[in-house]
């Protein structure tokens, strides 16, 4: 009997050991989605702890969770964005990127929100309308829709400025206005409002928007069509179930305007 008990005991111990080994098996790593971005508060930026943060980062993180992907945020030289996309450094561009005028340049997921392109001036500026910008000096961030709009201005709705200062960082754009180096600056309303309020300068936006931009996620044409389509569906779900609205509101963005035109609840 003693021998049988020892055999049974050894069998139980072996089974327990095997179960323990099974529990310690590492989980399979999720496939990564590498997203290229640049600093553009409040959409994408690096916080004080060195982590990626912002509206787009939160939307992307939740979208990746639903897709079963590991989100990886990689800050890139935005003027080299197409090169990074083509050579596979990043899988997509996710940085409050306007689809307007670029519809055929990429495969797009979105639009997931709308962004108002506006002009900001100092509170006591004589500039009241877009037409008043003719012959003036305007600061914009390089490689953005605002830059393209002013560089291509033909004097119809948007007048020709005397000088367009294309600056690398949005902080430089705001500093140029704050220090009276330029007459006006242009960009997304949410970005300029946050930057100008933090600089303690009195400013105002012109009533006329430059453009209402549809923001999307850009993939290299033909490279990730299935993933692009899946992401597009997930972004639509997030708009309709209220997830995107909650994220926008956490950053003080008018969700009704950002989700206008049928872009969600």
Image (cartoon, rainbow, N blue to C red):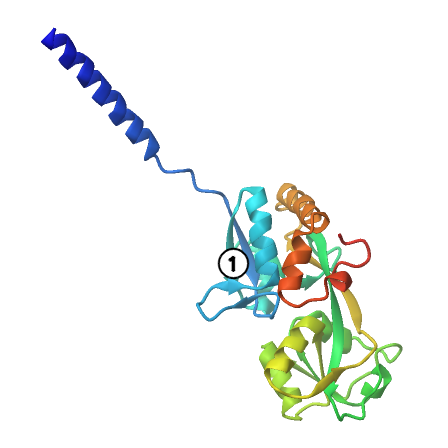
Q: Residues within 10 Å of mark 1 (few under 14, many from 20)?
A: many
Which residue in the rendered view is the most extreme toward the left?
2
Whether residue 92 is visible to the viewer of this picture, yes or no, is no
Whether residue 50 is visible to the viewer of this picture, yes or no, is yes
Find residue 254 and report its horizontal and vertical position in percent: 72, 66
Q: Nearer the viewer, residue 97 or 10?
A: 10
Q: Is residue 105 left or right of residue 93?
A: right
Find residue 258 and report its horizontal and vertical position in percent: 74, 62
Which picture quadrant has residue 175?
A: bottom right
| Quarter in which the N terminus is drawn | top left
Find residue 29 and report its horizontal and vertical position in percent: 43, 42
At mark 1, the secondary structure is strand
Q: Is residue 6 left or right of residue 113?
A: left
Find residue 224 and report its horizontal and vertical position in percent: 62, 45
Number of callouts: 1
Q: Write the residue at 50% across / 54% down.
A: 72
Q: Write the residue at 72% across / 62% down.
A: 255
Q: Write the residue at 75% across / 69% down.
A: 116
Which picture quadrant has residue 245?
A: bottom right
Q: Is residue 3 left or right of residue 11?
A: left
Give above or below for 145 relative to 246: below
Which picture quadrant has residue 263?
A: bottom right
Which residue in the rendered view is the most extreme toward the top?
1
Which residue in the rendered view is the most extreme toward the right?
156
Q: Nearer the viewer, residue 257 or 169?
A: 257
- The residue that mark 1 highlights is 73
Give above or below for 210 relative to 222: below
Give above or below for 126 relative to 41: below
Q: Write the residue at 31% across / 26% down.
A: 19
């Amino acid at each position: 009997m003693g021998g049988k008990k020892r055999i049974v005991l050894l069998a139980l111990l072996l089974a327990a050991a095997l179960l323990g080994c099974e529990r310690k098996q590492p989980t399979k790593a999720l496939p990564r989605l590498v997203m290229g971005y640049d600093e553009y508060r409040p959409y994408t930026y690096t916080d004080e702890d060195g982590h990626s943060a912002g509206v787009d980062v939160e939307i992307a993180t939740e979208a990746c969770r639903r897709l079963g992907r590991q989100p990886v945020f990689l800050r890139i030289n935005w003027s080299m964005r197409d090169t990074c996309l083509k050579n596979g450094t990043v899988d997509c561009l996710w940085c409050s990127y306007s689809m307007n005028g670029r519809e055929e340049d990429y495969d797009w997921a979105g639009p997931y929100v709308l962004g108002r392109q506006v002009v900001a001036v100092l509170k006591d500026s004589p500039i009241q309308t877009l037409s008043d910008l003719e012959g003036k000096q305007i600061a914009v961030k390089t490689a953005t829709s605002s830059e393209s709009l002013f560089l291509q201005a033909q004097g119809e709705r948007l007048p020709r400025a005397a000088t367009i200062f294309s600056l690398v960082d949005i902080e430089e754009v705001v500093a140029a206005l704050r220090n009276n180096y330029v007459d006006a600056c242009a960009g997304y309303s949410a970005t300029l409002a946050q930057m100008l309020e933090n600089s303690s300068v009195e400013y105002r936006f012109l009533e006329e928007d430059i453009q209402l931009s549809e923001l999307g996620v850009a993939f290299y044409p033909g490279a990730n069509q299935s993933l692009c389509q899946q992401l597009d569906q997930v972004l639509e779900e997030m708009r309709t179930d209220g997830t995107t609205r909650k994220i926008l509101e956490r950053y003080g963005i008018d969700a009704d305007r950002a989700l206008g035109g049928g872009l969600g609840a």
